[in-house]
Image (spheres, helix red, strand yellow):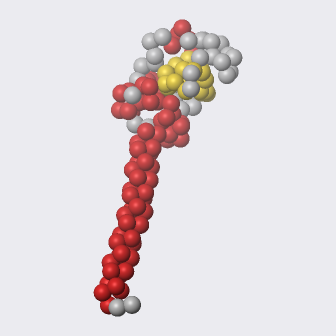
């Protein structure tokens, strides 16, 4: 093999190395961007909670992890999550818990759609203090 042929093979090898490196770099960049988007969608902030009511289902786990809801007063919950849904007193029949939630002692927040069902965050109150919560569907 002469020197010219060897130089051609080295250029081809370098080209393939760059192509393979570029592919791996693109995959790594896409994975990082995907992770960033996922984290953004699943991170609770008051602003996102109020602005994106149909995306709450993604961030409710982060809300529950960040804030100890049980023990909060009704006023604290409302200052954190805003006023409850206007039609919350009409949504008393839930599929999973099969429990009647008295509108007087319950704060209900719409979380969005999960498959075909509407998801709700239901906070039960005793003497104006959150005594428990559940996530249910209608």
Out of 11 and 115, give the one closest to the viewer.
Answer: 11
Q: Is residue 34 above or below residue 105?
A: below
Quadrant in which residue 18 is drawn: bottom left
Quadrant in which residue 114 is drawn: top right
| Quadrant placement of the N terminus | bottom left
**Could you say where residue 52 lies in the image, as x and y percent from the top left?**
39, 28
Q: Is residue 93 left or right of residue 44?
A: right
Specify whether residue 85 is in view: yes
Residue at image position (35%, 91%) is 2
Q: Is residue 34 above or below residue 25?
A: above
- Outermost residue on the front side: it is 1
Q: Is residue 132 left or right of residue 84?
A: right
**Could you say where residue 21 lies in the image, as x and y percent from the top left?**
39, 67
Residue at image position (65%, 13%) is 100
Out of 121 and 96, give the one closest to the viewer.
Answer: 96
Specify whether residue 122 is in view: no
- Outermost residue on the bottom side: it is 2
Out of 115 and 72, give the one closest to the viewer.
Answer: 115
**Could you say where residue 15 lies in the image, as x and y percent from the top left?**
34, 72
**Could you say where residue 47 lies in the image, as x and y percent from the top left?**
35, 32
Q: Is residue 5 above or below residue 107?
A: below
Residue at image position (43%, 39%) is 41
């Amino acid at each position: 093999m002469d020197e010219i042929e060897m130089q051609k093979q080295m250029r081809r090898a370098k080209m393939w190395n760059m192509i393979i490196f570029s592919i791996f770099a693109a995959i790594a960049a896409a994975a990082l961007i995907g992770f960033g988007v996922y984290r953004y969608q699943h991170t609770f902030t008051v602003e996102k909670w109020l602005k994106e009511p149909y995306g709450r289902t993604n961030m409710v786990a982060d809300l529950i992890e960040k804030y100890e809801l049980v023990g909060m007063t009704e006023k604290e919950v409302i200052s954190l999550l805003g006023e409850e849904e206007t039609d919350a007193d009409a949504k008393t029949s839930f599929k999973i818990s099969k429990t009647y939630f008295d509108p007087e002692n319950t704060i209900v927040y719409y979380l969005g759609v999960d498959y075909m069902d509407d998801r709700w965050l239901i906070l039960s109150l005793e003497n104006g203090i959150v005594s428990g919560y559940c996530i249910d569907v209608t």
